[in-house]
Amino acid sequence: MQPSPSTKLLAWYAAHGRATLPWRTTRDPYRIVVSEFMLQQTQVERVVAAYERFVAAYPSFEALAGATRADIVRAWKGLGYNMRAVRLHNLARAVIEQYHGTMPSGVEELRALPGIGPYTAAAIRAFAFEIDDVALDVNLRRVVHRLQFGLEHPPRATANAVDDAARALLPNGRGHDWNSAMMDLGATICTARAPKCAHCPLMAACAAAPHGEAEITRSSQARVAAKRQGPQARLPFPKTRRYVRGRILDHLRTLAPGAVVLPADLVARVDLDEIVDGLERDGLVVRDLGGIRLR
């Protein structure tokens, strides 16, 4: 009898997976939560050093909840998408207030906490509590679609069908390692734009593999091209609002706590008032004494 795809995947992970990543070697719910927030839209290589610094400075929900928002935003430097820091701070305070610092493991309890959606709840359950749940994100769904249904563009299966297939692949009692293995496979072998099918442990069972790497790549490129991009997405990054927001926050991080900077002293090529308004709405900065500072 041939080994199942999940058995082959777990064997590959044992030999080639990134099991030494710092959040893979712990089951501490706090550290898992921090890693999940940091890994959203950020490459693993950038997260490792920032994660180590952050958990050293704020080693628990209690420590994080007791810090000021300005301190947390400063500690988030280098990661971008700074609203994640605000959501993580709000989450820590909710865990302290509602659960006395102990992270719950139930789906409903987790989903009711600020900043936690379906994916993050499943990831916490799998990685912190070793519960057999599937952390369904775009990368895992891409791997499952190729494996079970073939090429992605146009989609050959509904989202629900892909999710059901992913859950069916999860072997009992292996939630932590299986999710980790699927993530590593998607990040290093079954990548979005240039899959390395010849090196994939699942090639023999993959519905997309007979089409070849070139056709899978073309399918992926077509999928990306089909996405409608707004005006900001078409701009060079240094001219986007996201870039300017990041530079404003980086400057504010260099100031002493409570110190303000005048908007006129900030140079930007977009509507500065609009940018500052957005930062204030997101709870990252506050207007004070005619200037702005970290909240």
Image (spheres, rainbow, N blue to C red):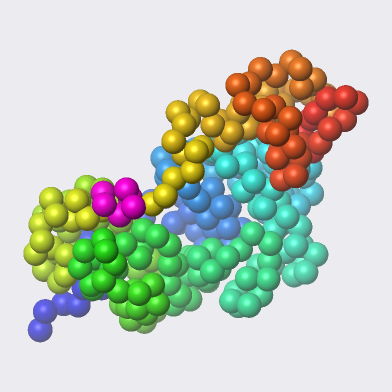
Give residue 180's position: percent from left, percent from top. 37, 61
Q: Residue at x 52, y 26 (%)?
A: 239
Give the side of residue 209 with respect to residue 164, left or right.
Answer: left
**The C terminus lies in quadrant:** top right
- Of 87 and 49, which appears nearest the observer? 87
Q: Is residue 142 magenta?
A: no
In which quadrant of the rendered image does the N terminus lie?
bottom left
Q: Quadrant of residue 179?
A: bottom left
Tell me which residue sits at (19%, 51%) in the image.
218
Q: Is residue 85 left or right of residue 181?
A: right
Residue 187 seen by the camera: no
Q: Position of residue 67 (x, y in %)?
A: 77, 45
Front residue (pair 121, 242): 242
As for residue 224 lying within the magenta part, the answer is yes
Percent from the top left, x then y, of residue 260?
Answer: 82, 24
Residue drawn 17% across the image and 65% down it = 208
Q: What secondary structure characterizes most of the magenta part?
A: helix
- The x and y percentages for residue 57 are 66, 41
198 over 124 or under it: above or below: above
160 to the left or right of 107? left
- Rendered residue at 50%/51% (across/down): 40
- Magenta region: which residues? 221-226
Pick the front one: 158 or 138? 158
Visible residue check, residue 262: yes
Counting every numbered tag in the picture gives 0
